[in-house]
Image: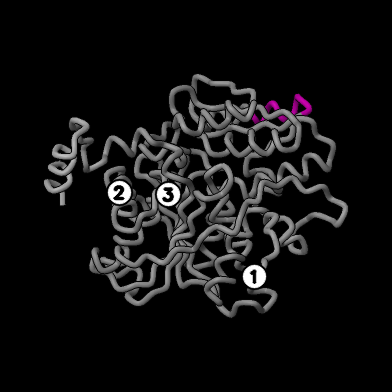
């Protein structure tokens, strides 16, 4: 029986491309190496001609793409002697920070907006032993406080303003190229704090500079219409959307993301909450892929742009699905099209329920 080498995480896999040495103690939970799934049913169902792949980042250890950057940020924090990390979060960052801090044996402090975080994400941070501080304000207020605290207390900030975060997250672009044998024509992502679109561009350009790929993708970022500073051309003070992961009005990677858009000849656009939830449901029902609402905005935007001709027919497209659907089960249950069926525990009743729903 043939055996394969055990996968030990993206820091080991891409060590030569990351700011770590042979002596660096790696803090890893086996992140990265997530599936690149080709959509087989949605293109025909929606009447579009394109090769669409989804990079399913919800299968990272804590259920989101944040693990890619967090393993790098926490590894460097420990290497530099830090005993505590801190972040502001809409949920996924706090879950990742808490998990990797637990792995490293250090303390994680997380600031979250009270009442505006999906319960699945809050549960993760609490279970991993983080010190959770709820603030009467949104993510942007929390982010400002974190930056101020970072100047006053001996803690390392692990939000995407930490440059090591983007270094870890660029690895997703490496994996996509290695599986497709080239960069896609378009790479489409949800945009909240805008670190991820920036990180992917770093990865693609590194491979291009080294001659591994001959062309770069157009980078397309989608925002919820109630939380769309890149569409408005200015910061949004009171962002609002069902897609909590991108409910951010003051993105920290603002300048970086505009540069990515310009250099790649891409664009930003917006989708309504209704479009986002419809795309989430479509992915789950037609492809068996369950992602959180923010993730689905990449599919919502791509389908609309394919139908309008903004993305040409025949294109090869990668959509990043940033987090798993179990992060926000309440939102998913509310839009389930099939109600629960209650019957007596008899063969006749169960058979009737089955035959009546064939």
Give the magenta-colored segment's residue range.
146-154
Estimate the x, y position of residue 31 in percent, counting from the top left: 63, 51
Badge 3 crowding class, 10 Å Cα cut-off, few under 14, some 14 to 19, many 20 or more, is many
Badge 1 crowding class, 10 Å Cα cut-off, few under 14, some 14 to 19, many 20 or more, is few
Residue at 50% from the left image edge and 33% from the top image edge: 121
Alpha carbon of mark 2 to alpha carbon of mark 1: how far? 41 Å
Alpha carbon of mark 3 to alpha carbon of mark 1: how far? 39 Å
Alpha carbon of mark 2 to alpha carbon of mark 3: how far? 12 Å
Please identify, in this view, whether the residue under mark 2 or under mark 3 is nearer the observer: 2
Please report whichever mark, 2 or 1, sits nearer to the chain's N-terminal start: 1
Please say whether residue 266 is visible from this viewpoint: no
Closest to the observer, 125 or 338: 338
Secondary structure of the residue carrying tag 3 is helix
Image-based side of 84 in relation to 220, left or right: right
Please report whichever mark, 3 or 1, sits nearer to the chain's N-terminal start: 1
Estimate the x, y position of residue 354 in percent, counting from the top left: 17, 46
Image-based side of 51 in relation to 356, left or right: right
| Residue 295, label in figure | 3
Closest to the observer, 85 or 3: 3
Closest to the observer, 239 or 277: 277
Residue bearing the label numbered 1: 1
Please report whichever mark, 2 or 3, sits nearer to the chain's N-terminal start: 2
Residue at 59% from the left image edge and 80% from the top image edge: 214
């Amino acid at each position: 029986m043939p055996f394969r080498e055990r996968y030990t995480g993206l820091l080991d896999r891409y060590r030569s491309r990351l700011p770590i040495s042979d002596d660096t103690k790696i803090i890893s939970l086996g992140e990265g190496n997530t599936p690149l799934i080709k959509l087989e049913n949605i293109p025909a169902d929606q009447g579009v001609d394109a090769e669409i792949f989804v990079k399913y980042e919800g299968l990272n250890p804590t259920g989101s793409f944040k693990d890619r950057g967090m393993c790098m940020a926490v590894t460097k924090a420990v290497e530099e002697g830090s005993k505590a990390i801190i972040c502001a979060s809409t949920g996924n960052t706090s879950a990742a920070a808490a998990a990797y801090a637990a792995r490293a044996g250090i303390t994680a402090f997380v600031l979250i907006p009270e009442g505006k975080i999906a319960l699945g994400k809050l549960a993760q941070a609490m279970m991993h032993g983080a010190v959770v501080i709820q603030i009467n304000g949104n993510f942007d207020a929390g982010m400002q406080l974190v930056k101020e605290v970072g100047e006053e207390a001996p803690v390392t900030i692990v939000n995407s303003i930490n440059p090591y975060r983007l270094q870890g997250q660029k690895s997703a672009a490496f994996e996509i190229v290695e599986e497709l044998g080239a960069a896609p024509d378009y790479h489409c992502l949800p945009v909240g704090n805008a670190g991820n679109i920036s990180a992917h561009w770093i990865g693609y350009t590194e491979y291009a500079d080294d001659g591994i790929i001959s062309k770069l993708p157009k980078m397309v970022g989608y925002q919820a219409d109630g939380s769309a500073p890149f569409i408005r051309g200015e910061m949004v003070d009171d962002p609002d959307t069902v897609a909590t992961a991108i409910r951010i009005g003051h993105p920290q990677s603002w300048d970086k993301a505009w540069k990515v858009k310009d250099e790649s000849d891409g664009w930003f656009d917006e989708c309504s909450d209704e479009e986002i939830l419809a795309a989430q449901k479509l992915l789950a029902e037609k492809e068996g892929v369950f992602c959180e609402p923010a993730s689905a905005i990449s599919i919502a935007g791509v389908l609309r742009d394919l139908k309008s001709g903004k993305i040409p027919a025949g294109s090869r497209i990668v959509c990043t699905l940033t987090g798993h659907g179990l992060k926000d089960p309440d939102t998913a249950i509310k839009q389930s099209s099939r109600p629960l069926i209650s019957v007596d525990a008899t063969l006749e009743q169960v058979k009737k329920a089955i035959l009546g729903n064939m």
